[in-house]
Amino acid sequence: MPEIRELDAKTRDRIAAGEVVERPASVVKELVENALDADATRIDARVESGGTDRIAVSDNGLGMSESDARLAIDEHTTSKLQSVDDLDSIGTLGFRGEALHAIGSVARLRIETKPRGGSRGTELVVEHGDLLSCGPTGCPEGTTVEVTDLFGSVPARRKYLKTEATEFDHVARIVTGYALARPDVAISLHRDGRETFATTGDGDRKSAVMAVYGREVASSMLPVESSGGDAPLSGVEGLVSHPETNRAGREYVTTLVDGRYVTAGAVREAIVDAYGSQLAPDRYPFAVVDLRLPPGGVDVNVHPRKLEVLFAEEAEIKAGVTDAVESALSEAGLLRSRAPRG
Ligand code: ADP
Ligand code: MG
């Protein structure tokens, strides 16, 4: 039997980081969420080689002082949660204080940040768990986080990255989800220096759809609106496409819960169900659908590091969503026959 030994801190960090940082898209998700939590009204995400070479997310949010920036990269440091009692009322996307620390232990992490109204910017560089430098720099208000050499210190993980095209698809899916969830924030995505899309941040969901998917898709969108429901679903709001505007990929169905971008397979199914025979099998509409849940009325189980949401009362939720989307389609005269529901 080999001798049992304690792992050193760096090895432990790298193993733990794998839980948070699986691929470039997980880095992008954490950075975009941090920007939203910092009240940004503009977020630019740039990736090179699908994010495997470089990821940079800039925001015009609250920014950080030098001492906060130093703290932010430590383990379990957060400005968002103080005790377990706050967990029930948490309003931010992050709260575990793990992301920046995890990213810094498996990549080169450079943060440039200046607090709103502050006079001093800070640049901080961490490389595979070591703080290389931290000092004053000239930069605009807000924060830019740049991640290079992802998994450079963990070849076993680097090996599992897929092609650049596949990694980019995952990144695009994430940034698109937040862009559609938050039409009030101007969000852009650049791939190898070229703009993939840029929303205006004017607050209008349809204009965000136009920026992301183009004019044709946007003009086929029908409003979904139902409110005043009882638990477990108090309302459904959003946009769904005309049945003729469809694709083979289910990634064009974006699901939100109380305005948060989530993956909810059940809700996606419920949306597709509403189209009935109007959609060929394996075809999906474009949709952005936001579920309104009564406060405290529903048990939403989200794995802390995953996007997938499970509902305690899934059948009722699904029926409510299908009803709302059916109403939207039939109001537009697009449902051939609608069986009366008893
Ligand atoms: P969490 O988001 O769970 O708090 P993170 O590791 O993602 O943990 O971030 C740690 C802290 O760093 C945040 O709580 C926040 O105070 C600060 N921070 C991170 N990103 C930004 C940003 N873009 N703008 C301002 N502050 C940030
Ligand atoms: Mg975070």
Image (cartoon, grey):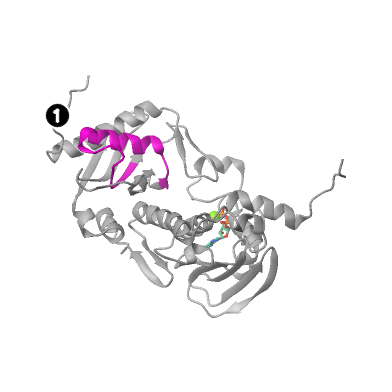
Indicate left or right for 259 with 80 as reference: left
Q: Residues within 10 Å of mark 1 (few under 14, many from 20)?
A: few
Asked whether 23 falls inside the magenta stretch, the response is no
Q: How many marks?
A: 1
Q: What residue sits right under mark 1 in the picture?
A: 337
Along the line of sight, the residue nearer the viewer: 267 or 92: 267
Q: Which residues are magenta?
A: 261-290
Q: Is residue 91 above or below residue 317?
A: below
* Residue 135 placement: quadrant: bottom right
* Residue 213 placement: quadrant: bottom left
* Residue 309 placement: quadrant: top left
* Mark 1 residue type: Ser
The quadrant in which the C terminus is found is: top left
Residue shown at the point (61%, 53%) measured from the top left:
98
Secondary structure, mark 1, is loop
Residue reaching furthest left?
A: 333
Along the line of sight, the residue nearer the viewer: 74 or 333: 333
Q: Is residue 217 above or below residue 137?
A: above
Residue shown at the point (51%, 59%) measured from the top left:
31
The quadrant in which the N terminus is found is: top right
Q: Position of residue 221 (x, y in %)?
A: 21, 49
Residue reaching furthest bottom?
A: 138
Q: Position of residue 321 (x, y in %)?
A: 30, 34
Asked whether 265 falls inside the magenta stretch, the response is yes
Along the line of sight, the residue nearer the viewer: 153 or 88: 153
Q: Does the rendering let one see residue 294? A: no
Q: Position of residue 119 (x, y in %)?
A: 53, 77
Q: Does the rendering let one see residue 289? A: yes
Looking at the rendering, the quadrant in which ligand 2 lies is bottom right
Along the line of sight, the residue nearer the viewer: 167 or 42: 167
